[in-house]
Amino acid sequence: MTGEVGRPGAGELVVVRNRAELAAALARAPRPLGLVPTMGWLHAGHRSLIARARTECATVAVSIFVNPRQFGSRADLAKYPRSEARDLAICAEEGVDLVWAPGVDDVYPAGFDTTVRVGAVAAPLEGAARPGHFEGVATVVAVLFGVVRPDRAYFGMKDAQQLRVIARMATDLALTTVVPCPTVREPDGLAMSSRNVHLSPAERAAAAVLHRALAAGRARWEAGERDAGAIRDAVRATLAGEPLAGVEYVSLADDVTLAELDRVEGPALLSLAVRFGSTRLIDNLALG
Ligand code: AMP
């Protein structure tokens, strides 16, 4: 019943566009309500978030919105892959009750003039590499939370810093419960990502080095290495073996604050950003 406002939780996928349709659908939705925010071009990573929400919530809602505010360049925004028909088929397969697929004006109506800025945890890594990115992310997620009012919201550990930024915001502003979900990977270890579609066959094969490099770092840590520099070096050494990999950063940081470490004494996050041609990929592994 795509395009009509039905009752979520009744076994049929309801697709809504504007806030009035969404409000009507939400008013009839059984609780608890779980929200899975996405930018579409859904893959097995998104499916795993939906499946987790399905086990915990009476109503599962997915938002599909490519958020202009979190892209640094118009070119990057323009080339982001989109296929609503494909996304809706996947949502139906996964038993989603409600999809909100708004236009830009539905999310940011005329006069919209608020920016949400999270503090220290948004500053390093992706925050440093992509100025304004996390402000765009926090602002759109605040709107999604405000409009949908989910009881729980599901985010992937693949975007580890984003997860921390949103969890910080959700806690500080008492918005909802954020549920972290594990990274889903291809058989060769590459983390699923909508951006993988841009990789040439050679780049796609080369990108398997990301997980190998992270695993090499984790192996050093498992063997007892506690010097953070030595662990970062092990990651870089593996990446250096792949000529197509243009390394942007390799980080070993405190798991909570994301401050770079000298020594690994507690839970830590090993993460990286690497370019393959014009495609920028991120990945991470938790240590401890
Ligand atoms: P995106 O559509 O890329 O904005 O991602 C929407 C949500 O799916 C975010 O919470 C991501 O962290 C999550 N996600 C993306 N890729 C994966 C993956 N490979 N495994 C688990 N979650 C993922």
Image (spheres, rainbow, N blue to C red):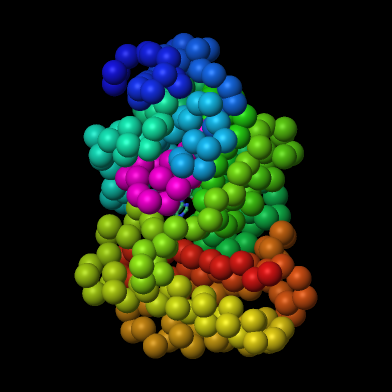
Q: Which residue sits at x=58%, y=22%?
A: 31
Residue 144 appears left or right of 18: right
Name the residue nearer the viewer: 89 or 82: 89
In the current view of this chain or complex, which residue is farthest to the left?
201
Q: Position of residue 151 (x, y in %)?
A: 62, 29
Tell me the magenta residue range.
35-49
Q: Position of residue 150 (x, y in %)?
A: 58, 28
Q: Position of residue 235 (x, y in %)?
A: 52, 82
Can you say whether 55 is above or below 125 in the image?
Answer: above
Q: Which residue sits at x=57%, y=86%?
A: 233
Residue 163 appears left or right of 174: left
Q: Quadrant of the C terminus?
A: bottom right
Count of numbered tags: 0
Residue 123 lies in the magenta-colored region: no
Q: Quadrant of the N terminus?
A: top left
Can you say whether 223 is above or below 129 in the image?
Answer: below
Q: Which residue sits at x=61%, y=85%?
A: 220
Looking at the image, can residue 226 be seen?
yes
Looking at the image, can residue 104 be seen?
no
Residue 46 lies in the magenta-colored region: yes
Can you say whether 90 is above or below 217 in the image?
Answer: above
Q: Position of residue 83 (x, y in %)?
A: 26, 40
Name the residue nearer the viewer: 101 or 92: 92
Q: Which residue sits at x=58%, y=78%?
A: 218
